[in-house]
Every structure is written in C-alpha cells, then in structure tokens.
Amino acid sequence: MEGKTEKCVYSTFILDDVKYKTTIPDKFANRKPYEPENPKMITAFIPGTILKIYTAANKKVKKGDILCTLDAMKMSNQLIAPMNGVIKKINIKEGELVTKSQVLIEFK
C-alpha cells in the first residue's frame, strides 16, 4: 500500500444522550434510502408467472377480493386486494413472467 494514503472521516451521532464518533463505510453512505410500501401498488413478492387475472381496469373491488394468481416455485399464490377501491391499471397479462417487486396492479 505504498504511495496510497486514505483519509479517515469521522462522523458523530448521538444515541441515548451519548455522543459516538465512528467512520461510515462507503456501502452505508451510498445506500438507497428507505421508502415505505405504497398500498395502492400491488407488487410481486417473488418472481413467477401470472396464471389468471380476476379483475380489470376501472372495476370496484373489496378488501379480500382475489386480484390475480401468481405461480412461483410450483405454488399458486393468490394476490388479494388489501383495501376497498377501484383498479386504476393492470400492468400484466396472463402467462407473463414477472420479477420480484414488479408492479402488477395499481389502485386509484
């Protein structure tokens, strides 16, 4: 490591009225900020294939209604409406492969 000098930058934070000095790793400093889930966006919790869609755009649904069936790892998972509302947009088609966290259905 000749010729290479690293400068340590210390950050101070307070926890329970005690000050701590520490270095912040690049991975932590460059992390993606936390964003809470949007309840109006139904996303795939696992990669898989859409088997059946039970709803359509502009259709009223009640909490607990089945929106679609997602086949993942040889299991059929029914995605249900988390609330009463109206469907704004269907972003999927039957037989389509979806990735984890892909937005499948949007509520108004």
Image (cartoon, helix red, strand yellow):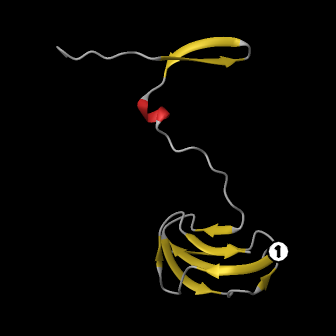
State the image coordinates of residue 1 (x, y, percent, origin top left): 19, 16
> Is 62 left, or right, of 76 in this rendering?
right
Residue 42, can we see it? yes
Does residue 56 lie above or below 75 as drawn?
below
Left or right relative to 80: residue 103: left
State left or right for residue 45 relative to residue 62. Answer: left
Seen at 27% across and 15% down, the residue is 5
Question: Vertically, is 29 above or below 60?
Answer: above
Q: Quadrant of residue 54?
A: bottom right
| Image quadrant occupied by the C terminus | bottom right
Tag 1, which secondary structure? loop
Q: Tell me if mark 1 has few (under 14), some (14-19) or many (20+) residues whose alpha carbon lies within 10 angstroms of its own.
A: few
Q: Is residue 73 visible in the rendered structure shown here?
A: no
| The one of 79 and 33 positioned closer to us in this rendering | 33
Nearer-the-camera pick, 94 or 69? 94
Which residue is found at the position 53% from the left and 87% from the top? Answer: 94
Residue type beneath disc 1: Asn
> On the image, numbered disc 1 is attached to which residue?
84
User: What's the residue at 54%, 63% (across, down)?
Assistant: 101
Residue 14 % position (x, y): 67, 17
Q: Quarter of the image holding residue 78?
A: bottom right
